Image (tube, helix red, strand yellow):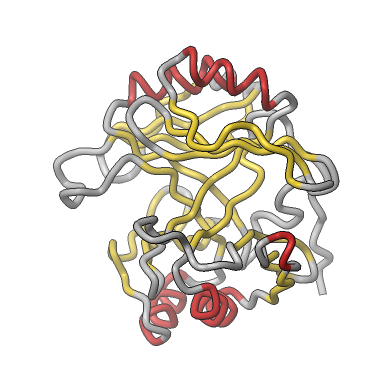
């Protein structure tokens, strides 16, 4: 069996973690456990039963252990690595962002904040201590890409450049939509896509996690069998075959079989 390399650090600005806030943690564990082959390490009461979702014994993602507060939607949040959360918080506020959660220390694990960019997409920053973020990536059942769908590409590009130093490279998305590769020191670490009238009414700007899978179509069929839904039919892109899915509680994510 091929050994899976373990990630041990992240460059500042690189998406390093994603977690799910859900109204039904038990139902979410049942769904994602079968869909991705995850095992779960449910934390103590002190952590709010925050749950590590593990693949091949390594941390792939996180999940809230208590039901989401009333009125808060089930949703995935993408976190970018930071080496100075407090300075980043000042830049966010100074450049039109909104801090939803001020910088806070999470026990011995790290420091975090949650914010929105000027067009309204929610994102997080994570400054690691004991927890570096995902220790497995780009393998089936783990994160392989993070993508911002934004209503204002120009404003989003300027904001993340000022906050995280992102630079951009336009590419063909395969769907004829304006698309930018997000670069950190010349390396592609994510994407940005311009939302158009083709997006369903009421869908806000958002960061979308992409999870690697062995077969996008089979994953979609399994998701439907488990009570989820296909929200965007499977398509072939220059980078692989992908399908947008919704879990039974309403969390939206993309499953992608990476091109060889």
Residue occupying the point 67% across, 22% down: 86
Quarter of the image with the N terminus in it: bottom right
Q: Is residue 94 above or below residue 99?
A: above
Residue occupying the point 41% across, 34% down: 192
Residue 127 coordinates in the image, percent (x, y):
73, 35
- Tell me if 252 is positioned left or right of 62 in this view: left
Residue 103 coordinates in the image, percent (x, y):
64, 32
Residue 47 coordinates in the image, percent (x, y):
71, 59
Residue 220 coordinates in the image, percent (x, y):
40, 75
Residue occupying the point 66% across, 38% down: 112
Quarter of the image with the C terminus in it: bottom right
Q: Is residue 40 above or below residue 178?
A: below
Tally of marks? 0
Camera-nearest residue between 179 and 18: 18
Name the quadrant containing residue 189.
top right
- Tell me if 194 is positioned left or right of 17 in this view: left
Residue 242 shows up from this direction: no
Residue 82 shows up from this direction: yes
Q: Is residue 185 above or below residue 71?
A: above
Camera-nearest residue between 73 and 189: 73
């Amino acid at each position: 069996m091929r050994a899976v390399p373990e990630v041990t650090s992240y460059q500042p600005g690189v998406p390093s973690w994603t977690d799910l806030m859900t109204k039904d943690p038990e139902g979410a564990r049942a769904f994602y456990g079968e869909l991705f082959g995850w095992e779960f390490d449910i934390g103590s009461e002190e952590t709010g039963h925050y749950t590590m979702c593990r693949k091949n014994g390594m941390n792939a993602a996180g999940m809230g252990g208590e039901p989401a507060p009333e009125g808060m939607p089930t949703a995935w949040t993408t976190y970018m690595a930071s080496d100075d959360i407090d300075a980043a918080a000042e830049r966010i506020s100074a450049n039109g962002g909104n801090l939803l959660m001020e910088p806070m220390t999470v026990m011995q694990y790290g420091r975090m904040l949650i914010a929105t960019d000027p067009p309204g997409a929610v994102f997080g920053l994570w400054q690691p201590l004991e927890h570096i973020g995902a220790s497995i990536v780009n393998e089936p059942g783990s994160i392989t890409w993070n993508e911002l769908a934004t209503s204002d590409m120009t404003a989003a590009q300027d904001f993340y450049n000022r906050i995280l130093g992102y630079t951009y490279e336009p590419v063909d998305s395969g769907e004829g939509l304006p698309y930018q590769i997000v670069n950190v020191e010349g390396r592609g670490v994510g994407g940005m896509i311009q939302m158009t009238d083709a997006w369903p009414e009421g869908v806000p700007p958002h960061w979308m996690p992409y999870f690697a899978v062995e077969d996008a179509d089979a994953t979609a069929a399994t998701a439907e069998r488990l009570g989820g839904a296909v929200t965007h039919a499977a398509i072939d892109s220059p980078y692989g075959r992908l399908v947008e899915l919704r879990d039974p509680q309403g969390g939206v994510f993309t499953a992608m079989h990476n091109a060889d």
